[in-house]
Image: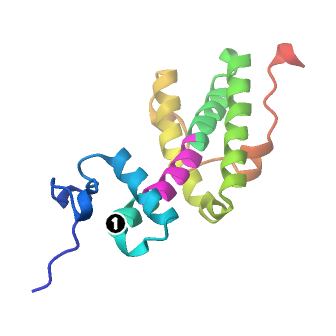
Amino acid sequence: MAHPAPTREDAPATPHAEGRTRYADDVYTWVQEQVALLRAGQVDALDLDNIAEELSDVGSEQYDKLESAIEVLLAHMLKWDHQPERRSRSWSLTIAEQRVRIDKQLRRNPGLKSRIVEAITDGYRLGRLRAAREMKRSPNTFPEECPYTWDDILNRPFEFEADR
């Protein structure tokens, strides 16, 4: 009977070959050792399963950063559109800041462009809840699906009256 592949949590707490640190015991030291092994060309000594998990996590973190920026931006767009009497310079600047964060993520990680529709969908679901919480309203106040196009998200003007 085949055994499932070990996970990070399954790693034994004792050091492995040549006294190197186990991933489960000390991630920081483990990373330093893996980097040293890579640089020394000792590929056979690498902890490939945990390296693969870490690389997968890095990719997920990049998507999460994009989604988070979209979430905050969409929450502020909803607040701007549904509470015009409360518009502020802070909201306008938050929208501008999140646009910079989105641009930065996409420039650094062009592969994320293929996941923009997914990031908008996920970001809107959270942004809608955030806007509802901050405005003390029901989420049903807002459309269930994102009402903004990608062009709106990136380019629609949001100028505070006093700054015009």
Q: Which residue is mark 1?
A: 47
Left or right, residue 17 beside residue 130: left
Q: Residue at x 25, y 62 (%)?
A: 18
Left or right, residue 57 beside residue 120: left
**Image x and y of residue 23, in percent:** 29, 54
Q: Residue at x 69, y 21 (%)?
A: 84
Pick the quarter of the image with the N terminus: bottom left
The secondary structure that most of the magenta stretch takes on is helix
Q: Is residue 128 above or below residue 62?
A: above
Callout count: 1
Q: Is residue 55 above or below residue 78?
A: below
**Image x and y of residue 25, in percent:** 23, 48
| Of the pair 98 and 121, the residue shown nearer to us | 98
Residue 87 seen: no
Q: Residue at x 62, y 60 (%)?
A: 112
User: What amino acid type should be assigned to the residue bearing mark 1?
Assistant: Asp
Left or right, residue 22 beside residue 95: left
**Image x and y of residue 31, in percent:** 40, 52
* Classed neighbour count for the residue bearing mark 1: other residues with Cα under 10 Å, few (<14), some (14–19), many (≥20): some
For the record, the magenta segment spans 56-68
